[in-house]
Amino acid sequence: MKSLSIKNVNKFYKLGNKEKFQALSDINLDFTKGELVSVVGESGSGKSTLMNFIGGLDSDFSGDIEVYGTNLQGLKDKQLDKYRKNKVGFVFQSFNLIPHLSILDNVTISLTLSGVSEHEKVKKATMMLEKVGLGNQLKKKPNQLSGGQKQRVAIARALINDPDIILADEPTGALDTETTGQILEILKKIADDGKLVIMVTHSEKVASISSRVIELSDGKVIRDEKNKNYKKYKTRKNKEKLEASKTKNEKQSLGFWSAIKLAFHNMWASKTKNFLMAFGVAISISSLILMLSFSSGLTGYIQSMASQYSSPTIVTISKKGDSSDPFSFVSPSPFTREEIVEVVNDLNNNALQITDYKIDIENDVSYGYMAVTGLTRTASITYTNSEDEELNSSLFAVYTTPKYYNSSNLIKGEISKENEIMVSQGVINQFGEEAFGRTVTISIDFNGTIIKKSATITAIVESSMFNSMNVLYIDYDFFSRTVYEETLQATGEGVELEPSSIYIETDSQETTNIINNYIKTKEEYSGSMEEKLATMFSQMMDTFGIALAIISGISLIVASIMILVVLYISVTERTKEIGVLKSIGARKKDIKLIFTSESFLVGLLSGLVGCALSLVSIILIKIILTAIIGFAPITLTWYYFLISILIAVFISVLSGLYPSSKASKLDPVEALRRE
Ligand code: ADP
Ligand code: MG
């Protein structure tokens, strides 16, 4: 039976607009198994073109090529891939081994593409390499072998899937005479074992040892001679035959884990480049984690701060300022006495309609005042220390002590009353511990009038928010009397301090909740100043968060483009490798899977490095912030790591799509021609 039959094959290469070049004309040839055929002819006579057709690397020809009855003409891409994988084996002049894979892996690769199990793959490839005399070189890399040894690896690779036809395009072109002899010997054995071996050669000497010589000239067969003196080897034992056993339970496709393993090998080959790329991506990933940690840290901090200022049986009500102005708390609108009566009546008649509890305006309601110093007002405390130095502390805010404050709100000391004040830790830091218990002078710009008053520091107030700032806490009654007296003295007319918030003492948490919920429905009122401050902080945080998100987003885009460029260049650099993979039957899908696995690994590595990087920076930031401002509003949660790794993998795989698809679409003949 004819193994291979070539009928009326013609090939025209298109050159420019309308010109065509005929590379093959009317080729008619029949081959049977066991033949060792030499194809000779001058350079450009069409030898490689013909070999590429027989090997299924190129199917753009007219005519028919039948292999054991299957016509290659009109086969679909997938069928051609299968044909290359199982029916033909290629041996090239320049060996075309994959440089970063070991000898063993170079041979197992076509089995890997068929989804053969690890154990069987290694067993088969080892046996094949032993047969070509390389049993002790399995772990070496191609560049550690001589030319002849490389070609033997290539032959082992060509034979591993037990093909019917071996195609060798100038297999001895790069070898010396002695090695040429050894390679020819192996090819002859392959033919004698019952395969069809077709090789292209320039050497008449090489041609003379084959069973048949075909000469091409300008795309035509001008000689086809059988060698009458050709002697087959005597029948050899099965063990010595250069044949691989047929593989069992083949899945015919590259498995996911094999692809990952292969990708890992490929990436390890250029580890510096890949690590640098991953590091670049990791920086944007870690900025993402930092952003998330800061946002949640600050949000949590603000919430804890706001809850610190709430008491289960005290309701705080203040007037809402201009809602469009986040800084409205700086100039709180005061309540008049009439408005306070109105609010209390409203609550009693509506919110507390069905409860037994009613607010008693004389006993349950107290007042509060708060002012944050801005550009237009100043407030300070002056202290003359034991060395007679006058120290001045500018205040960030002046607070009247809320009625619900008790010793648990203090770091040290007792709640201040008449002629006494309390301060934040920041003031004590400035004056020194000795100032505690001493008399100081407070001076506050009150609508243009400077209020001055001597008072004793009786306590340091604990406040997660204000510990590091300078804040004065003063009893409401003491403050309002001082304001009245001082303004009276300065202008002749005493000013009644109008409260910026009112505190209502309730009988239970339940009542507090009822009133708070009612207040929420009111347009003109809000909760405490602290709550307002918290709201302002969260508004600022939101803006800050958006800015951070944009920065992270941009850095992720930059990272994606970097991955795309690096992978794209890698495809260009590895064109030949892709050609080799295609010649041994890799499908588009397989190539895509290998390259996608590489981008997946880049993403995974970037994500992991990014997590490590952010962990280190967060620890450092915590240490530094704690040292400087006494707290670190940064909260790291484990799922940020998970999210970041997922994002890193996602952007990598996404960026790898185009390069992978480009790799998979490369034309094998052109890719192999690339140096
Ligand atoms: P050989 O292997 O015998 O040296 P080839 O089969 O490589 O010759 O080429 C046969 C002829 O076809 C040559 O003249 C070559 O220039 C031409 N040829 C090969 N590939 C192409 C191509 N892709 N486009 C145009 N002409 C080509
Ligand atoms: Mg050629």
Image (spheres, rainbow, N blue to C red):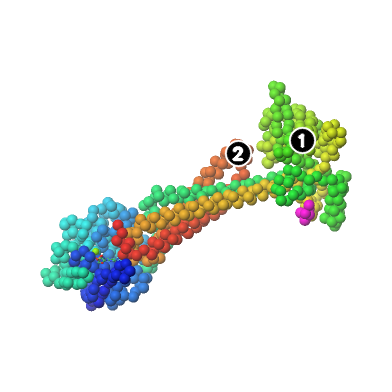
Q: Residue furthest left?
A: 229
Left or right of residue 291, residue 405 in this image: right
Residue 445 has which mark?
1
User: What type is the residue that disc 1 sits on?
Assistant: Asp
Q: Residues within 10 Å of mark 1 (few under 14, many from 20)?
A: some
Q: Where on the picture, by quarter, is residue 329? A: top right
Predominant secondary structure, magenta span? loop
User: What type is the residue that disc 2 sits on?
Assistant: Thr
Q: Residue at point 13% right, 70% down? A: 227
Q: Nearer the viewer, residue 3 or 27?
A: 27
Q: Provide the residue span drawn in magenta.
A: 519-524
The answer to which of marks 2 and 1 sits earlier in the sequence is 1
Q: Which of 322 and 186 is in front in this view?
A: 322
Q: In this view, does 497 lie above or below 588?
A: above
Q: Quadrant of ligand 1?
A: bottom left
Q: Residue at point 23% right, 53% down? A: 146
Q: In this view, does 403 lie above or below 602?
A: above
Q: How crowded is mark 2: few (under 14 residues within 10 Å), some or many (20 or more)?
A: few
In the image, residue 416 lies at what x, y percent? 78, 35
